[in-house]
Image (cartoon, rainbow, N blue to C red):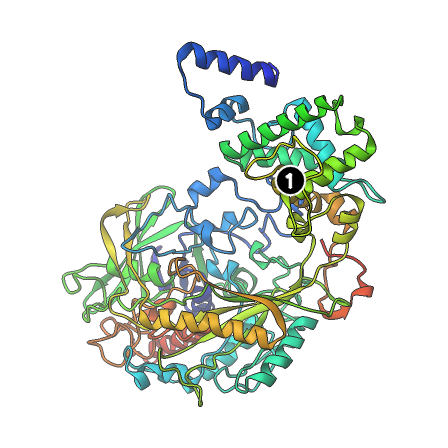
Amino acid sequence: MTEIDRRTFLQRLAVSFGVVLTPGTTAAILTGCRPDPGIGRQFFTAAEYLLVGDLVERIIPATDTPGAREAGVPEYVDMLLTHFSDDQVRGEVREQLLALQGWLREHQADRIEHLDPELAETLIAALDQEAFPTAEDGPLPLDGLPGGETPLFRRLKPWTVAGYYTSEVGALQELHQSPMGVYQGDIPFAEVGKTWA
Amino acid sequence: MGVNQWDAIVVGTGMSGGWAMRVLTEAGLKTLALDRGRMVEHGDYPTEHKQPWNMPWRDGRVHPDDRKDYPIQSRTYAFSEYARHWFIKDTDAPYAQDQPFDWIQPDVVGGKALIWGRQSYRWSPMDFEANQRDGHGVDWPIRYEDLEPWYDLVEQTIGVSGARDGIPQLPDGVFQKPMDMNAAEKAARDRIEATFPGRRVIIGRAAVLTEPLDGRAPCHYCGPCMRGCSTGSYYSTQSSALPAARATGNLTLLARKLVHSVTYAEGRATGVRVIDMETGAFEEHTARLVFLCASAPGTVRIMLNSKSPEFPGGIANSSSVLGHYLLNHHARVGAGGEMEGMEDRYWRGNRPNGIYVPRFRNLGGDRRPDYVRGFGMQGGASRSGWARGGSMRGTGAAFKAALRVPGGWRIGLQAYGEVLPYHENYMTLDDELTDKWGMPAVRFHVGRFDNELAMRKDMAATAAEMLEASGARNVTTYNNAEIAPGNTNHEMGGARMGRDPRTSVLNGWNQCHDVPNLFVTDGACMTSSACQNPSLTYMALTARAANYAIDQLKTGTL
């Protein structure tokens, strides 16, 4: 059953039995039974998974080293939502992704990559500004963003960062690990060159 | 000797038990060591050097379902998916709390010596005189000079790295070469020491090798010692005491044995009564000497449960103070801030150690009107890494490039304060609650009082004042008084040493006043807590007591 079908089904169920669906119970039922532990796509629908992959890749893109998608960040985020989040967080994230999918459709795009490149940049900047506002910010450059008490990037940014830099790609290719066997407390940064993973 | 007859029995194989079994076996005594935890052989460290991406939930995160089994243990800093297998399953070993008390317990042979913080500080003459001087608690029956040679022995045997700092209230020991400070720590030290005469900032003294010792390799600076160290670079029962005791041929070590009680007849301990944790069956073992080293609450629990017509309230409890005067350290109070500059400086390697500020309050000319005793501080500085990206504005290649360079320096100081001995801080056996094996559970009754609360205000303010002097900006303080006593891991007291059998359980040799062949050398023996991390003192007291017991056996006194 697709996401929308399940939601519709639940609404019909609620109407026919007079059940009051709180966001929590909706999310719980939408999530289904608790999947087996491990990393893989268990929470996200295929469409959500693609969207999250596009978002995390915009946060940490492939450059001279692989980006967040190749480092397995979408699966990592799925694992956090499946095993380490409560129904409220799951429900809010799902609502935000649904809203973002709706926003894309309004702009005649299935994926962020299908937007005009400039508009795609503006979308990501707006999601970032919404989550991490500063005093110098003007109004959000776009209307109709997912919003919410905890904006999407306030969660997705730290999840992406943690997922990326604790991955083999992030720790060993993008950054590096301190070699074993020595401790030098005070050396020029130039001798090291980049952040220790 | 019969099957279950021994020269000596040691209950517990951690910080104190490791030393007891080493000294007793090396003196030729056929020794039985018992531990409630499962066996862990040296090198059997399944998460050592595991990468975050090789962990089931990435980087040690504890699954909510697992957390339900470890509601108390999961509150200690050392607990994570990397170390969960060392800790006791709280649901198997419940205890009662009149007020919240976090009893952090490993459940493996080696005990806390496998997962300890490794900070190793001597007490000073002042600490052994404190009770007598200000009247809180009974006088210690020993002085620094009594323990000094045993500190020497312990430091040389376990290996302690540190600098000879020449601080009277934190005596120098026999040290291996010290670890380095980083750029921000050195800058903070210079400014703090220049601003506050009498306050010192030193590199931590840690039971982590910087030079080879007895087949153990110097630290390779991987970082998280609590996962276990197959090169034996930090002191543990597995890396040092156990191989030494085994080499004598005199050690029998039995794991998964829960000691139920000490047996007693005609003025002497005759042995121990033990529950086999696999079968539930009771066993009896007899010996000429019994050493209790099961952690302060663990030892007192066994003693309270050792009832006889002579001692209806627990063995060696003619004074009725057994279980009382529980001590711990109070912490989770301090300050943090940002250090500007030094962005051209960095480090290489993961140092399992920090910086230390020895006590400076209520000594010399620095007197406080609002509390007695004092506190030390542990801390460190580092540059922020990739994790700062989680709350940073920015996306894309520029964001990624920014995190490739470390962020600014941050510095923090956390205070560890002395807790006074109070009769009303006590533990008993619960009337109803038992553990999975039917042994009566502990009930804790431990609070904090005015002296600690007044000290905490000063601890936070002082940490902030020192960080500001160090040049730190945006200094913020914390005082998490809601975190339960016990969470610092340093539980002590309950069977205190003293000069008077009417007000103490143990004499100056850690020997029960009432039962001369029963010795208690773990944290339960402590008469006051001082503010230093206590393990080094437990080890020195144990070595001293075990040697005394051996001498007494030889001369026929015991």
Q: Position of residue B72 (x, y in %)?
A: 41, 50
Give whichever of B334, A103 is nearer the camera.
Answer: A103
Give whichever of B333, B437 is nearer the camera.
Answer: B333
**Residue at horizontal 66%, vertical 23%?**
A102
CA neighbours of label 1 inside 10 A, class few (<14), some (14 to 19), many (20+): many
Query: Toward which corner of the image does residue B177 lie, by quadrant?
Result: bottom right
Query: Toward which corner of the image does residue B497 lie, by quadrant?
Result: bottom left
Q: Residue furthest top?
A: A16
Q: Is residue A190 above or below residue B275?
A: below
Q: Position of residue B460 (x, y in %)?
A: 47, 69
**The N terminus of chain B is located in which quarter?**
bottom left
Q: Is residue B451 above or below residue B350?
A: below
Q: Residue furthest left?
A: B309
What chain letter is assigned to the residue under label 1?
A: A
Q: Position of residue B369 (x, y in %)?
A: 36, 82
Give whichever of B112, B157 is nearer the camera.
Answer: B112
Residue underneath mark 1? A153
Q: Is residue B533 visible?
A: no
Q: Position of residue B248 (x, y in %)?
A: 50, 66
Q: Is residue B325 visible?
A: yes
For mark 1, give the secondary structure.
Answer: helix
Q: Is residue A27 above or below residue B504?
A: above
The amino acid type, in three-letter code, at marker 1 is Phe
**Residue at horizontal 53%, vertical 43%?**
B62
Q: Residue furthest right?
A: A64
**Residue at horizontal 50%, vertical 87%?**
B168
**The C terminus of chain B is located in which quarter?**
bottom left
Give whichever of A124, B352 is nearer the camera.
Answer: A124
Q: Is residue B442 left or right of residue B484?
A: left
